[in-house]
Amino acid sequence: MNVYHFKKGTEICNYSYSSKILSIRLNRQRLVVCLEESIYIHNIKDMKLLKTIMDTPPNTTGLCALSINHANSYLAYPGSATSGEIALYDGNTLKTACTIPAHDGPLAALTFNSTGSKLASASEKGTVIRVFSIPGGQKLYEFRRGMKRYVNISSLVFSMDSQFLCASSNTETVHIFKLEHLTDSRPEEPPTWSGYMGKMFQAATNYLPAQVSGMMSQDRAFATVRLNISGQRNICALSTIQKLPRLLVTTSDGHLYIYNLDPQDGGECVLIKNHSLLGSGRMEENKENDLQPPVPQSYAATVARQSTVPSTSTMPGYSEDGGALRGEVIPEHEFATGPVCLDDENEFPPCATKRLFKTSKLVTKWNIHPQPTVWL
């Protein structure tokens, strides 16, 4: 593993491991290297090896998740190779927090929300997605993605405000679930025939087998997207562009699709734009979209433009000690030349290096904060 300073273009350090590196996760406090049967935790400031978790269950895909909130640095990884047990580890105290019996089958996806207070998971079946509280591990939500088809979940991500959870797979459908506030008291509904039948149906589920009643109580998708492709791996992100919620879907064939998301009514999301990320500069836009179309250009050309960072030594938005809090500052040295602003419709979203295999194929992860460049 080589760690580079992105702005200076110099190598910071390099490490060798006993077997193939399957995945790397990092925040501003910890860097985690996942092998098939072991996990290495480094201190991000000096890259000192703090902890080696040995003899983990066989993890051939390198599945693990690290909270981007470095105030807790929780790490989640499979606790079993045959069941959906999640092992939760505190990356700051270097102690095991708890184990969560999340699913019956092996795990396929794990992700934290932005504050590290919630953890979402999916099994290899891909039909049910569950959300747990952290660090307690209590189940908060249960969503049903589908009933008949077993799918491979390729992307599972929260919105920054933790109000929505997005799941995509090898099918043509992307599901967005809404995390409603949990309240014990609900306003009394007016006595209508539909309300009466709803209460009767809810009461009847108490007499059904637990597996059947549990399926009926699972929430369905709040919003969906129908992609024009199927069978390709994709990565999703929920973001806010020009103060409007957007769903971003990037596919393995090099395209970025931007959809509108109705935060009130949900339903079918509308395609707004389609960008090519392979340097062709091709861009398609929904004619009904009221946003101004950007000037067609490649991602490389966008990054190569002159920097527009102000000359002041700090900028509002991020603090090394406190995390992403409003009103704090970002040191100037943390900005790379030619920043890409997600709030600017004329530019592409920023990319941080997520994983680089021996075949030099790059897998990117959307992130609003700059991070060190790490590749294998």
Image: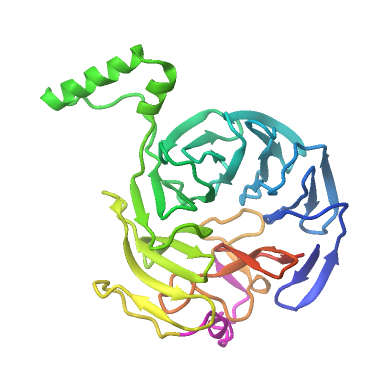
How many numbered marks have been drawn onto this rendered protein structure? Answer: 0
Compared across the picture, whether 240 is left or right of 130 comes to: left
In this view of the protein, which residue sits in the foreground, 127 or 374? 127
Question: Magenta part mainly helix, strand or loop?
Answer: loop
Colour convention of the picture: rainbow
Compared across the picture, whether 61 is left or right of 339 comes to: right
In this view of the protein, which residue sits in the foreground, 96 or 46? 96
- Residue positioned 53% across, 58% down in the render: 233
- In this orientation, does residue 342 appear? no
Residue located farthest toward the left when viewing the structure as drawn: 192
- In this orientation, does residue 278 appear? yes
As drawn, 27 above or below 132 = below
Residue 9's quadrant in the figure? bottom right
Q: Position of residue 32 (x, y in %)?
A: 74, 51
Residue 368's quadrant in the figure? bottom right
Compared across the picture, whether 24 is left or right of 287 comes to: right
Q: Position of residue 143 (x, y in %)?
A: 42, 37
Q: Quadrant of the N terminus?
A: bottom right
Residue located farthest toward the bottom when viewing the structure as drawn: 306
- Residue positioned 56% across, 56% down in the render: 324
Asked if the stretch drawn in magenta spans residue 154, the answer is no
Question: Which segment is the magenta one?
Answer: 297-316
- Residue positioned 39% across, 60% down in the render: 227
Q: Position of residue 185 (x, y in %)?
A: 31, 24
Residue 93's quadrant in the figure? top right
- Residue positioned 68% across, 73% down in the render: 333
Q: Quadrant of the C terminus?
A: bottom right
Asked if the stretch drawn in magenta spans residue 308, the answer is yes
Compared across the picture, whether 222 is left or right of 153 comes to: left
Q: Position of residue 153 (x, y in %)?
A: 52, 48
